[in-house]
Image (cartoon, rainbow, N blue to C red):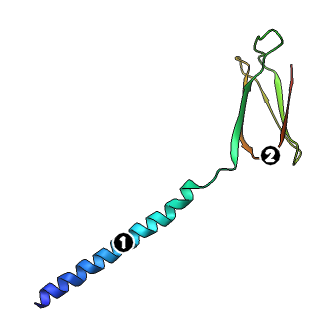
Amino acid sequence: MGLDRKACSWLRLLGYITLTCFCFVLLQSQSAFGQVDEGSITGTVQDATGAVVANAQVTLLNTDQGITLQTKTNDSGGYTFSPVRIGHYSLSVTA
């Protein structure tokens, strides 16, 4: 009879430990579903005829904070700014 009682207490303890670990994992995983405050801006530079413009200077200005980012277009006329924080931006291109 004493052995059965001891076995039940160990099983109950194991159940509590398992439940505690499961709750801890669930609470920790909530941060994985948070909002992201960064993104990217991509595009293609084309001239008036629709031809792509390679090696054009693309400037991205954050009008809220005055931060400027610059890049050049690739051979296909494409550019990417990443990561970009949430805000208001102005884009200019020179070739």
Image coordinates for residue 45, horizontal then vertical, percent? 78, 20
**Local secondary structure at mark 1:** helix
Image coordinates for residue 39, horizontal then vertical, percent? 69, 42
Q: Residues within 10 Å of mark 1 (few under 14, many from 20)?
A: few
Task: Residue 42: name its quadrant.
Answer: top right
Image coordinates for residue 43, horizontal then vertical, percent? 73, 26
Find residue 89 and name its label. none
- Residue that mark 2 sits on: 87
Question: Which residue is more in the foreground, 54 or 23?
Answer: 23
- At horizontal 81% and vertical 21% (from top left) the residue drawn is 56
Q: Amino acid at mark 1?
A: Leu
Quarter of the image with the N terminus is: bottom left
Quarter of the image with the C terminus is: top right
- At horizontal 44% and vertical 64% (from top left) the residue drawn is 25
- Whether pointer 2 and pointer 1 mark residues with C-beta atoms closer than 8 Å, the reply is no
The alpha-carbon separation of the residues under discs 2 and 1 comes to 43 Å
Image coordinates for residue 32, horizontal then vertical, percent? 54, 55
- At horizontal 76% and vertical 17% (from top left) the residue drawn is 54
Q: Amino acid at mark 2?
A: Gly
Find residue 19 and name its label. 1
Left or right: residue 36 versus residue 72 is left
- At horizontal 77% and vertical 11% (from top left) the residue drawn is 50
Where 51 falls versus 88 (above or below)?
Answer: above
Task: Residue 90: name its quadrant.
Answer: top right
Q: Earlier in the sequence, mark 2 or mark 1?
A: 1
Left or right: residue 90 versus residue 5 is right
Left or right: residue 3 versus residue 63 is left
Question: Which residue is more in the foreground, 68 or 27?
Answer: 27
Observer able to see residue 80: no
Observer able to see residue 2: yes
Where 93 falls versus 15 (above or below)?
Answer: above
